[in-house]
Every structure is written in C-alpha cells, then in structure tokens.
Image: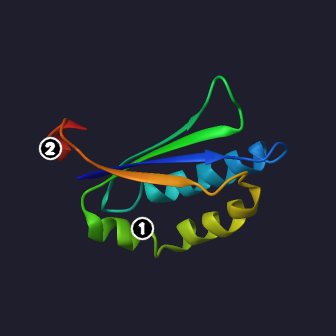
Amino acid sequence: MIATTVTVYVKTGFTEDFIRHTIENHKNTKKEPGNIRFDFLQSKKDPCRFLLYEVFIDEDAILQHKKTTHYNKWKEAVESWMAVPREGVPHDVICPAGEESW
C-alpha cells in the first residue's frame, strides 16, 4: 500500500470552490477499486491550507486514479486556485499492515 499526503494552499477567496470540487473528487475516488482511503482535511490554523491523505493498494492503482475523469476534472478546476503548486509526498505504509485493518 502507498499513502500519499498532498498539501494544498488555496488563494484567499477560493476555499469554498476548492472544498466543493475536492468533495466531488473524494466521493468518486472512494469508488475506485484500488483506493483504500481518501481523507480531506482543512487546517484549523490556516483555512486556506488543506491536506489530502490518500491510500492506494499499489502504484498501478495510483496511475489508474490519475487517468480518471473525476481526478482530471478536479485538477483542471482547482489548479489556478492554488497559491503555490501542491506538494504530494508518497509513503510506504508500515501500520496498519493489511488492507483489512483500515
């Protein structure tokens, strides 16, 4: 399994639009067979800072996700609202060890 944290800083005035589009992406990503988890978080200290926590079963599932209509629609919609380019950092999952533990 691969967990990726994606930090996004959204320009002031675009947070509600970003939230709306990201919720739609979240709902569709959760339906993908290779997705284990997709959390969408907003900073308590900075309402323009968001964190996406995504877990996929393997690299192929991530590649398939990036080909989906909903992901590409999200990416195109939100890109101009970002104050800086988003930063995704992939991680190997140590615990929980198995998909059934999620």
Name the residue type under label 2. Answer: Gly
How crowded is the residue under tag 2: few (<14 C-alpha within 10 Å), some, or many (20+)?
Answer: few
Mark sitting on residue 98 = 2
Local SS, label 2? loop
Q: Of all residues shown, which one is farthest toward the front? A: 84
Q: Quadrant of residue 76?
A: bottom right
Q: Position of residue 28 (x, y in %)?
A: 50, 59
Nearer to me, 14 or 26: 14
Q: Which residue is mark 1?
A: 65
**Residue at the image position 56 percent from the left and 57 percent from the top:** 25
Identified at 60% across, 55% down, the residue is 24
- Outermost residue toward the right? 13
Q: Which residue shows up at 37% across the image and 72% down it?
A: 63
Question: Gap between marks 1 and 2, in whole Å?
Answer: 21 Å
Q: Residue at x 19, y 35 (%)?
A: 95
Q: Quadrant of the C terminus?
A: top left
Name which residue type carries label 1: His
User: Is 37 placed above or below 79 here?
Assistant: above
On screen, residue 60 versus residue 52, left or right, reads left
Residue 62 horizontal/vertical position (percent) = 36, 65
Which color scheme does this rendered protein use? rainbow
Q: In the rendered image of this protein, does residue 45 appear above or below residue 12?
A: above
Instruction: Count neighbours of disc 1 (C-alpha within 10 A) and say few if under 14, some if 14 to 19, many if 20 or more.
Output: many
* Label whose residue precedes the other's in the sequence (1 or 2): 1
